[in-house]
Image (cartoon, grey):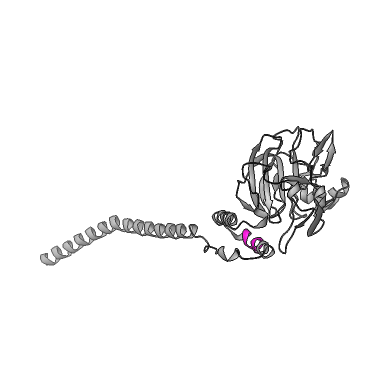
Amino acid sequence: MVFQILLKSRLIFLLLIWISLCCVSFPSILAQNQESEEARAEAAWTEESSWEPEPIDFEGMSNLSASALRRRLSALIPELQPNARRKLYMQLQDWQPDWFEHWDDKELFPDSTRLDTMPQRLQFVLLEEGEQLIYPWHGEELTYGYGPRNGHMHKGWDTHLEAGDTVVSLMNGVVRYAKFNHSGYGNCVMVRHFNGLETLYGHLDRIDVQQGDVVTAGEALGLGGSTGKSSGPHLHFEVRYGGFALDPALLMDWTDEGPVAKTKVLEMDKSLLSKEKGGESHHAPHVVKSKTHRVRSGETLSSIARKYRSSITKLKKLNRLRNADFIREGQQLRVK
């Protein structure tokens, strides 16, 4: 009997020791399992985040015609990661398509082009299949156009904007120049397009691209401002060929709904180019002061447009609205 009691006591004692060991080791085991799960999850995330698309074979594109290459680029560029776009830029330098001639990333207006060596008739295919034209900023109005002004030649369009408004590229292209310019443009971006034309965006508050960036129509280049020789926030926009300016109205019309392309193919005499390459002179732009409206209960974009003799489309562009129904009471809307 005594032996049985001792045996049971020993078994109970061993059981208690085993339970105590489990209490100590089990949380450690759980922690180790949790750490292992976290490590596996982190490894999976790292592998996923470092994933890159399969490298694109650009070599097969070098033999394409100018038109076919542009169509291929318009479909390809939006899908490319920044590193792939940089590789594309280097490939274009090697291929040297016609529109890549006289490339200069140091001077805004290269010295290597001359009017007397250009053909009398010039032709530019503005848009190929899959391409589009998006004006850099849909302001309330065109404040100054192309032509003589105050004894000087104004070589572009001026449109009002607020400092900090986004300025975008007119068409697909490659950034050739992106830095502060001391001849009057201030923070300035020049984009070479696939048709040989270039567009200039002056007086920016901030530049968000760098030389060699491949951009699409509507892609942000920077923020509008009043840098350089400017006395108020506005976008100074120019179209150039070989460094010589041409009237943007040859490419597009300014309408109540914003600028629209006139034609897909521009044919012009070289006499329509500016006689000199020089930049703009100092001027005081006709500044259009913004006007805002606070949305009241029951108001719609349609009723607000009628009140200010505007249109729903114009208000959507001014306020970057995608859906006219998504306005709320108390919201501040730009109406001019």
Looking at the rendered image, the quarter that the C terminus falls into is: top right
Residue 222 location, quadrant: top right
Q: Nearer the viewer, residue 106 or 39?
A: 106
Q: What percent of the width, then of the height, locates residue 156? A: 78, 43
Residue 79 location, quadrant: bottom right
| Residue 239 highlighted magenta (yes or no) | no
Residue shown at 45%/59% (left/top)?
47
Q: Nearer the viewer, residue 49 or 208?
A: 208
| Residue 76 highlighted magenta (yes or no) | yes
Looking at the rendered image, the quarter that the N terminus falls into is: bottom left
Does residue 104 appear to the left or right of 304 in the view shown?
left
Q: What percent of the width, then of the height, locates residue 186? A: 68, 36
Residue shown at 74%/59% (left/top)?
127
Residue 286 seen in the current view: no
Main secondary structure type of the part rendered in magenta? helix
Q: What percent of the width, then of the height, locates residue 109? A: 69, 42
Magenta stretch in the rendered image: 72-77
Rendered position, 244 above or below 152 = below
Residue 235 seen in the current view: yes
The outermost residue toward the front is 116
Residue shown at 33%/56% (left/top)?
27
Q: What percent of the width, then of the height, locates residue 291? A: 81, 40
Rendered position, 127 above or below 284 = below
